[in-house]
Amino acid sequence: QVQVVESGGGLVQPGESLRLSCAASGRMVSVNAMGWYRQAPGKQRELVAAITSGGTTNYADSVKARFTISRDNAKNTVYLQMNSLKPEDTAVYYCNADVSVTMAFVHRYWGQGTQVTVSS
């Protein structure tokens, strides 16, 4: 069984920073791409940032230059450094990990979500 667990959400004021962490653990061959999505009330879940096992990154236009995704492959952990936060960044943030459960089977696992609220 594979588990994906996020941490680091909270309440901050506009302009402040937060760092989210997400770790994948359990029986697996390897962790491939990892990423962060978010879902605000009344809106669809959207991609925030993603990173491959080789370190290639992809960002939503709305967070470029403010957010940075990184990972520690030895710990199967991905991070999201969020700077210059805006009220429109308020959402539940979900981590995902594309895990090779066997050599022939890859499955996307999701975390339970962590709330990020940006408000003065």
Image (spheres, rainbow, N blue to C red):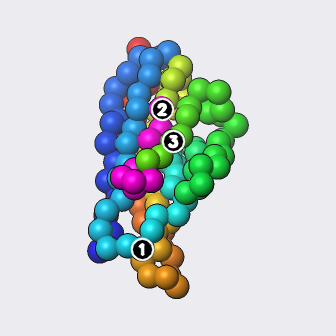
The numbered disc on residue 8 is none
What percent of the width, then of the height, locates residue 28? Answer: 38, 73
Check disc 3 and give the amino acid type.
Ser
- The residue under label 1 is 29
Q: In terms of sequence position, does the residue under pointer 2 or pointer 3 come before the other?
A: 3
Asked where in the image residue 17 lies, by quadrant, the reply is top left
Q: Nearer the viewer, residue 5 or 38?
A: 5
Could you say whether the residue bearing mark 2 is in a helix, strand or loop?
strand
First to last magenta residue range: 73-81
Q: In terms of sequence position, does the residue under pointer 3 or pointer 1 come before the other?
A: 1
- The residue under label 2 is 81
Q: Nearer the viewer, mark 2 or mark 1?
A: 1
Is any part of residue 119 visible from this angle? no
Distance in Å between CA atoms under marks 2 and 1: 27 Å
Q: Residue furthest front?
A: 74
Q: Residues within 10 Å of mark 3 (few under 14, many from 20)?
A: many
Asked where in the image residue 19 lies, by quadrant, the reply is top left
Please report the residue visible at 51 percent of the width from the left and 42 percent of the height from the top.
Answer: 70
Is 79 a magenta residue?
yes
Asked where in the image residue 114 lies, by quadrant, the reply is top left
Check disc 1 and give the amino acid type.
Val
Q: On the rendered image, what quadrant is the N terminus found in?
A: bottom left
The numbered disc on residue 70 is 3
Distance in Å between CA atoms under marks 2 and 3: 8 Å
What percent of the width, then of the height, locates residue 2? Answer: 33, 69
Left or right: 63 in relation to 78 = right
Q: In terms of sequence position, does the residue under pointer 2 or pointer 1 come before the other?
A: 1
Task: Confirm or deny contact between disc 2 and disc 3 (CB under 8 A).
Answer: yes
Q: Residues within 10 Å of mark 1 (few under 14, many from 20)?
A: some
Q: Nearer the viewer, residue 68 or 120?
A: 68
Left or right: 66 in relation to 23 = right
